[in-house]
Image: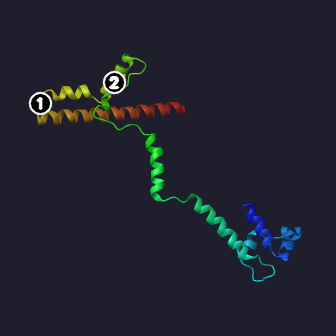
Amino acid sequence: MQALVARAAGALSSTATTAFASSSLRASASLSLNRLFATKPSNAEDSVNWAVLDTTYDTQRNVRTTQHVMSAEARWEERSKTVVAGLLPPSNAYAGRSVEVRNGAVTEALRRLQTTLSRNRVQQELRATARHEKKGVKRRRLRSQRWRRRFAHEVRKKVQLVNAIRARGA
């Protein structure tokens, strides 16, 4: 970037350089660096050597783009190697009902397994599927369970509301 600025400064004609260097013109808003480089001036003497600037910019841009250009397949392969290396192995049929025994702590592993089984309601499901349940009885049981779940949710919401009101000091 510094080389680009140095070449751009060398590309300025002598009158533009003296005008840019004078402090009175630098302070004025009529000649700013942005305006100087943004448009090609009509006067050739106060002009920047645009051919030098264009070639400098093109070579800088080409160097930048050719260094980091990869095909989509190469990017995919590189990204896949890094991402797949950090993934866990795929689950199997026993993944949800298995726990890891750490440092020989079997009782702790059994406790974690029991927690997982109770959260997934495995015992209740086994008890329910032990015998056939008639359609009407099952429908009534499920309706009751839905009602109880909804009622518990509403009670939790009301308790949260009361706690929020108490926290406000009302």
Give the residue at x 11% y 33%: 134
**In whole angstroms, how far apart are the C-alphas of marks 2 and 1?**
28 Å
Question: Which amino acid type is marked by label 1?
Answer: His
Q: Position of residue 102 (x, y in %)?
A: 41, 21
Give the residue at x 24% y 25%: 123
Asked if 153 appears above or below 107 in the picture, the reply is below
Asked if 94 appears above or below 8 in the picture, the reply is above
Q: Position of residue 28 (x, y in %)?
A: 83, 70
Q: Earlier in the sequence, mark 2 or mark 1?
A: 2
Observer-nearest of 72 and 111:
72
Asked if 19 appears above or below 119 in the picture, the reply is below
Marking on residue 15 = none
- Please give left or right for residue 167 compared with residue 60 in the image: left
Marking on residue 132 = 1
Observer-nearest of 82 and 169:
82
Q: How is the image coloured?
A: rainbow
Select label 2 or label 1 by which is in front: 2
What residue does disc 2 label?
A: 113
Q: Position of residue 95 (x, y in %)?
A: 32, 32
